[in-house]
Image (cartoon, rainbow, N blue to C red):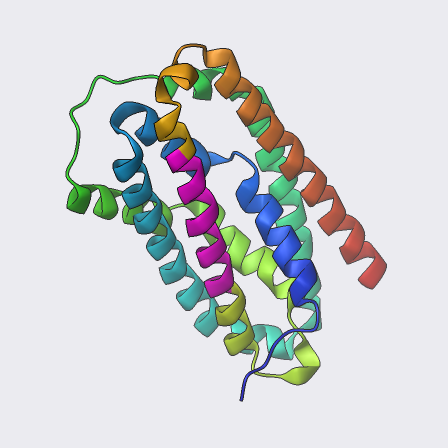
C-alpha cells in the first residue's frame, strides 16, 4: 500500500524552492564546477544526495513513531524548522561576500570521481542543515491521521534527495560550462548567495505563519 500525503504538491513546491535557493550545497557544487568542471560537480552532487538520504532514513525511522503520538512535538518541530530557515537566510545575507570569494579558490589539485563522491557524501551526511530540514520541515507535510508516519517521512525525504540531485546537478553543469565567466567576478556569486538568503528567509516566515494558523 502506498501512502501519499495529501499536501504532496505543496511539499514539492517548498522542497524545490529550498533546493533551488543557492545555499551551502549549491555553493559547494558551484565551487567544484568552477575549479574542476562538470563531471566533478555532478559527482559531488551524487555523493551529497546519498549522504542526505542516509540522514532521511535515520530521521524517518527514529522520529516517525514519536510524531505519531505527540501533537505538541509536531508543532514544536514546525517552529524549530521555521526559525532555522530564518537563521540560515540571515547568515547567507551576512556572509554572501566571503562565501563568494572562497568559491574562486583553485589552489588544490583535481580529485578523482570516486574521491569526489565520497567527499560529497560526507558533506551531505554531516550537514546539520540536512538533519534539521528532515527533522523539522518534513513533518509539517505528513498526514498524521493516515498513520505510517515513518513511511511518509521516508517518501518525502527520498523525493527531496531526487529533486536535490537533479537541481544541484543542473547548477553544476551550468557552472562548469560557464566557469570562466563565474570566476571572473565574485560579485556574481555574491548575488547568488543573497538571492538564496532571501528565499530561505521567506520560506522560514511562511513556515512560522503556517504553524500559527494550524496551531
User: At 50% from the left edge and 57% from the top edge, which residue is drawn?
Assistant: 160
Q: Is residue 161 something one can see in this rendering?
A: yes
26 to 70, vertically: above or below: above
In this image, 168 relative to 77: left or right? left
Tell which of 83 and 89 is nearer to you.
89
Give the vertical position of 183 relative to 135 (above or below): above
Q: Quadrant of the C terminus?
A: bottom right
Query: Residue 7 location in percent, x, y?
Result: 70, 67
Identified at 22% across, 47% down, the residue is: 118
Q: Which residues are magenta?
A: 157-173
User: Is residue 85 left or right of 108 when viewed as pictured?
Assistant: right
Outermost residue, front side: 177
Q: Nearer the viewer, residue 97 or 75?
A: 97
Name of the residue lying farthest toward the right = 213
Q: Based on the displayed image, in which of its 4 quarters is residue 105 positioned? A: top left
Q: Is residue 169 magenta?
A: yes
- Left or right of 187 in this view: 111: left
Residue 20 in the image: state x and y as whole percent: 55, 41
Q: Is residue 164 magenta?
A: yes
Residue 34 drawn at (x, y percent): 33, 24
Residue 21 place in picture, x, y as percent: 57, 37
Which residue shows up at 35% across the image and 52% down it?
A: 125
Numbered circles on residues, count: 0
Amino acid at each position: 500500500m502506498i501512502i501519499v500525503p495529501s499536501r504532496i504538491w505543496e511539499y514539492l513546491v517548498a522542497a524545490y524552492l529550498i533546493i533551488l535557493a543557492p545555499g551551502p550545497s549549491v555553493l559547494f557544487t558551484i565551487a567544484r564546477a568552477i575549479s574542476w568542471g562538470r563531471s566533478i560537480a555532478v559527482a559531488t552532487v551524487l555523493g551529497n544526495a546519498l549522504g542526505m538520504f542516509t540522514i532521511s532514513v535515520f530521521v524517518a525511522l527514529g522520529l516517525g513513531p514519536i510524531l505519531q503520538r505527540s501533537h505538541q512535538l509536531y508543532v514544536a518541530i514546525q517552529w524549530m524548522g521555521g526559525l532555522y530557515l530564518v537563521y540560515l537566510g540571515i547568515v547567507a545575507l551576512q556572509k554572501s561576500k566571503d562565501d563568494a570569494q572562497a568559491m574562486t579558490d583553485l589552489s588544490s589539485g583535481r580529485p578523482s570521481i570516486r574521491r569526489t563522491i565520497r567527499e560529497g557524501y560526507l558533506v551531505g551526511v554531516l550537514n546539520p542543515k540536512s538533519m534539521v530540514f528532515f527533522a523539522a520541515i518534513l513533518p509539517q507535510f505528513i498526514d498524521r491521521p493516515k498513520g505510517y508516519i515513518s513511511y511518509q517521512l521516508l517518501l518525502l525525504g527520498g523525493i527531496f534527495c531526487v529533486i536535490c540531485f537533479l537541481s544541484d546537478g543542473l547548477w553544476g553543469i551550468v557552472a562548469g560550462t560557464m566557469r570562466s565567466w563565474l570566476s571572473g567576478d565574485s560579485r556574481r556569486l555574491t548575488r547568488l548567495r543573497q538571492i538564496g538568503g532571501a528565499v530561505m528567509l521567506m520560506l522560514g516566515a511562511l513556515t512560522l505563519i503556517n504553524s500559527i494558523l494550524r496551531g
